[in-house]
């Protein structure tokens, strides 16, 4: 091809680079094959012992086709079998981190990354175009799920270490303000994951399960207008579909990892839902709790509609006025005024009382004037954006239905990616 090009005196660059890539990869695969010839066979210094404690016996060589980022490589290594329980081991596979898989670590890493970013089908297309690798969507799904699961198991061990204080948190400079924000968002699930679950469908059934997403970030400065500024690259995320209790420990451990102990101020941002308050009270009882201002406004708007419909002018006038009280942090003023204006219709009254109860229960979390004077964020936009970008863009695309295992694996991968800790995980594997 090169000769033809030079004879023609004209080079079709794209044709050449496309034709050369597979040749180059094949040459690399060949070298890799040579390199692997010395791994996993021949005399071993230590004996191979079964999990049951018995000394295993060599069964001679076995080959498997290993798929790598350079293409397929045939790998031959010794197999050992346990004479008492029949289990087998391939020490070579253990050395190369390919136990029970025919895909190399480099390839698995690429597949997990691709499959966590977009649909498994699109991921295959990306791998083909970017790396010249042919894999199936099912392959990508399996590999991404397995790695997501291993990653979650690894981070569970890390959490335990932090919580037992076995792992000293590297001493950071004092953090002026540490924010912890969390929220829930529905993930569409396959029907069998929803059997017996109550939901928001008309017939009371559920189509989704709630993924809980939390983020931790820090703030050191205010801008020239006195508004808080989030420290660049300071946001990390955790998220899973799990109970509020389990999630509470997850977000708490994340806060510890991020320097909870060295924070001068800790602020919890949320939408005022019961599980959010519950976690705050259990794990962060010294923190300042703030209900997202926009949620609070929404509740005040709803209240105005319930009290003054169908008088649009009145609704608008009261909304402006009460939003002002809200900004001042004077929820009591709204409660006093509204209590005198309850609608006569009993179902309207019930709904209005519900809104009043929400405001009353959360009033200490709505002292916005005071929060602003202390330079705090009063909106939970960061975690809401996280719900969209981490959960929504990958897990809530139209027509998707997830298994719990699949959704949680992908969530683990995406949170780790967005938090910049995926590299730590790969390093821990290599160690
Ligand atoms: Zn055994």
Image (spheres, rainbow, N blue to C red):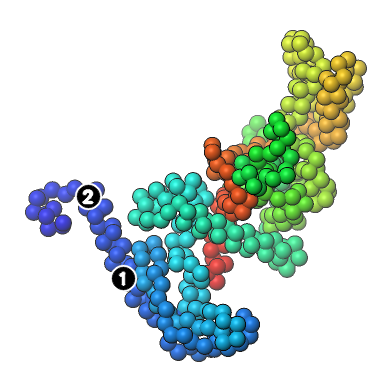
Task: Say whether residue 353 is left or right of residue 243.
Answer: right
Q: Position of residue 389 (x, y in %)?
A: 57, 41
**SS category of the residue bearing label 2:** helix
**Nearest to N terminus: mark 1 or mark 2:** 2
| Mark 2 nearby-residue class (10 Å; few <14, some 14–19, many ≥20) | few
Q: Which residue is mark 2?
A: 15
Residue sitting at 55 percent across and 68 percent down? 429
Q: Which residue is mark 1?
A: 30
Residue sitting at 76 percent across and 48 percent down? 244
Q: Nearer the viewer, residue 307 or 261?
A: 307
What is the quadrant of residue 103 in the picture? bottom left
Residue sitting at 48 percent across and 67 percent down? 101
| Mark 1 nearby-residue class (10 Å; few <14, some 14–19, many ≥20) | some
For the N terminus, the quadrant is bottom left
Q: CA distance from mark 1 to mark 2?
A: 24 Å
User: Any mark on residue 151, and which?
Assistant: none
Can residue 95 be seen? no
């Amino acid at each position: 091809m090169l000769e033809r090009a030079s004879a023609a005196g004209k080079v079709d660059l794209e044709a050449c680079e496309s034709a050369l890539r597979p040749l180059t990869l094949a040459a690399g695969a060949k070298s890799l094959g040579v390199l692997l010839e010395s791994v996993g066979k021949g005399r071993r210094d230590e004996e191979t012992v079964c999990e049951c404690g018995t000394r295993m016996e060599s069964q001679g060589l076995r080959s498997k086709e290993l798929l790598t980022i350079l293409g397929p490589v045939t790998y031959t290594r010794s197999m050992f079998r346990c004479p008492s329980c029949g289990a087998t081991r391939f020490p070579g596979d253990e050395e190369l981190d390919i136990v029970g898989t025919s895909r190399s670590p480099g390839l698995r890493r690429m597949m997990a990354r691709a499959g966590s970013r977009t649909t498994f089908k699109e991921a295959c297309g990306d791998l083909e175009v970017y790396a010249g690798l042919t894999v199936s969507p099912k392959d990508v799904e399996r590999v991404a799920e397995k790695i997501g699961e291993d990653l979650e198991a690894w981070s569970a061990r890390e959490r335990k270490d932090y919580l037992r204080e076995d792992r000293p948190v590297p001493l950071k400079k004092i953090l002026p303000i540490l924010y912890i924000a969390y929220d829930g968002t529905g993930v569409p699930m396959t029907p069998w994951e929803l059997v017996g679950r109550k939901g928001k469908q008309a017939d009371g059934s559920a189509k989704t399960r709630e993924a809980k997403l939390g983020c931790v970030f820090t703030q050191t400065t205010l801008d020239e207008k006195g508004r808080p500024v989030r420290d660049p690259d300071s946001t990390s995320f955790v998220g899973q579909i799990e109970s509020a209790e389990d999630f509470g420990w997850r977000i708490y451990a994340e806060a510890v990892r991020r320097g909870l102990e060295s924070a001068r101020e800790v602020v919890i941002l949320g939408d005022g839902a019961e599980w959010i308050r519950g976690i705050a009270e259990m794990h962060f009882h010294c923190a300042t709790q703030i209900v997202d201002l926009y949620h609070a406004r929404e509740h005040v708007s709803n209240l105005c509609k319930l009290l003054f419909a169908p008088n649009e002018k009145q609704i608008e006038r009261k909304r402006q006025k009460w939003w002002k009280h809200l900004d001042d942090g004077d929820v009591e003023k709204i409660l006093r005024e509204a209590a005198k204006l309850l609608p006569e219709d009993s179902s309207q009254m019930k709904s209005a009382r519900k809104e009043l109860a929400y405001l009353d229960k959360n009033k200490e979390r709505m002292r916005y004037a005071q929060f602003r004077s202390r330079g705090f964020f009063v909106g939970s936009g960061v975690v809401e954006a996280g719900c969209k970008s981490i959960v929504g863009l990958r897990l809530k695309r139209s027509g998707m239905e997830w298994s719990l295992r699949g959704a949680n694996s992908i969530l683990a991968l995406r949170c780790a990616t967005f938090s910049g800790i995926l590299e730590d995980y790969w390093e821990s594997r290599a160690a």
